Image (cartoon, coloured by chain):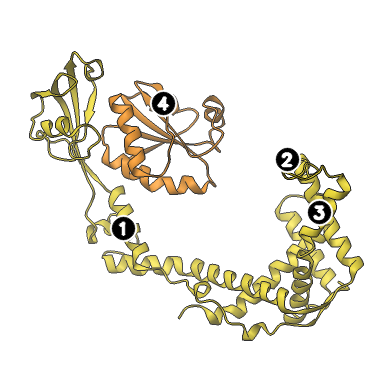
Amino acid sequence: MKSTITNLYDYKSASIPEELRRWRIPDAEIQARLDTLSHNHSVETEPDTVEALDGVACKGESTVPRWNRPNLQFYPGRKLCSETMENALIGAKLGETRMVHTEEGNITLTVTRIVRRRHMPVGDALVQAEHIPGVSTLADFARWYRETNAPERQYNAKMRMAYYLLHQITDRSEYDINETEKKAHVSERVELIYQAYLKAGIDPTIPEEGTDFLTEEQAKEKMYRQFESTFPMAVASEYLVRTLDGIDDVDAFCQAGLEKLAADNHLTVEKLLQDNGIYVCQEQLLQNRALELLADHAEQYLEA
Amino acid sequence: MVYEATDQTFDELIQADYVAVDFYGTHCGPCKLLEPVYNEMSNDYALVRFVKANIDTCPELKERFQIFAVPTLKYFRDGKLFYEGKHHGEREVMDKELAKLLYD
């Protein structure tokens, strides 16, 4: 790029917000996971006497139509139905008939099935049921869960810090901007987004409430103003790749990246550029690499 | 237990007295928030059949039930659509919807 940074913000002395540094898995998350497992390993039985929280299938007989059905269900204690009806079933035996008096009328309920489902208690037996190699106690599970998830959490925290640093560098560095280059980059992005809007059925010339209709040129100018702030980040990314990675030939770096990106997406490079624009693709490749470099730097700031 | 339906198995799965169906999408955030609540309900209401259907992999169901947004909950009684849920993710509200299915 012809544009460059003339005075790089001293990002190495930047103060990283505490919340971006965090990656450790809290006890509450492990407890929530255990609770989910406890649900997943619930045990179902069909006892002969109704207790609170059981599922109870009944044949209903009543002059009230909605209770005169052969397949009523009740869940005593869950307050899904009137408490009078739910409580009337507690203690009932399979096949037993009970009469319930309600404001709607009398209802005769005959118990046809009782299903009791109870969560498996959170304990060593629960984690053993998961058959995780090397895990036989709750302490093992907590250790395994943390070890398994740590790499992803650390990576995410490093990338959050990298984004933060890239924004700081973009905002606080000094630039020598080549206006022709900037116009080419931003205009390409505007054109792509303009066409994407049209393809999605959104007309960018239709104004926001209370303003006049825009011409196509005005709509694009408006979008240009919205997107021109993306250019300094592109310049900063290119600068970081050049200086931190020691890459002199950035064009060759981008070309190799484009070829890989095209291959990964089963496209030709020409088709990739036609759909996404050469500057947008290059900016993305450079930004991704700059973020990787900053993430490496940010590793030292990870929560201890 | 929650049954995962496909275009092929859906009609068989809804053949029960009372059935709840969660139409969800693979990359839908609100669907992921609903999932633990739905799983919990499937444990608490042992006689109701709880089904979920991924509209990304079940195009016929998406078309048939005109699913334009996910998650969408639909309730079936005796194999027929009884009504469509209005709220998602709040246990208290979903309990009321289930009560409507069971007792209305």
3D distance between C-alphas at marks 3 and 1: 52 Å
Q: Earlier in the sequence, mark 1 or mark 2?
A: 1
Per the rendering, the mark at residue B83 is 4
Q: Which of the image's four quarters has the C terminus of chain A?
A: bottom left
The answer to whether residue B49 is seen in the rendering is: no
Residue under label 3: A222
The reply to whether discs 3 and 4 touch (Cβ–Cβ < 8 Å) is no
3D distance between C-alphas at marks 1 and 4: 34 Å
Q: Which chain is orange?
A: B
- Name the residue at 43% across, 38% down: B87
Q: Colour of chain A?
A: yellow
The reply to whether discs 3 and 2 touch (Cβ–Cβ < 8 Å) is no
Of the residues shown, which amino acid type is indicated by label 3? Lys
Residue under label 1: A34
Please state if B94 lies on the left or on the right of A300 as rendered: left
Which of the chains bears the disc numbered 2?
A
Residue A187 position (above or below residue B43)? below
Of the residues shown, which amino acid type is indicated by label 2? Ala
Of residues B61 and A247, the one nearer the viewer is B61
Which of the chains bears the disc numbered 1?
A
Residue A161 falls in image quadrant:
bottom right
3D distance between C-alphas at marks 4 and 2: 32 Å
Q: Earlier in the sequence, mark 3 or mark 1?
A: 1
Q: Which mark lies nearer to you, 3 or 4? A: 3
Of the residues shown, which amino acid type is indicated by label 4? Tyr
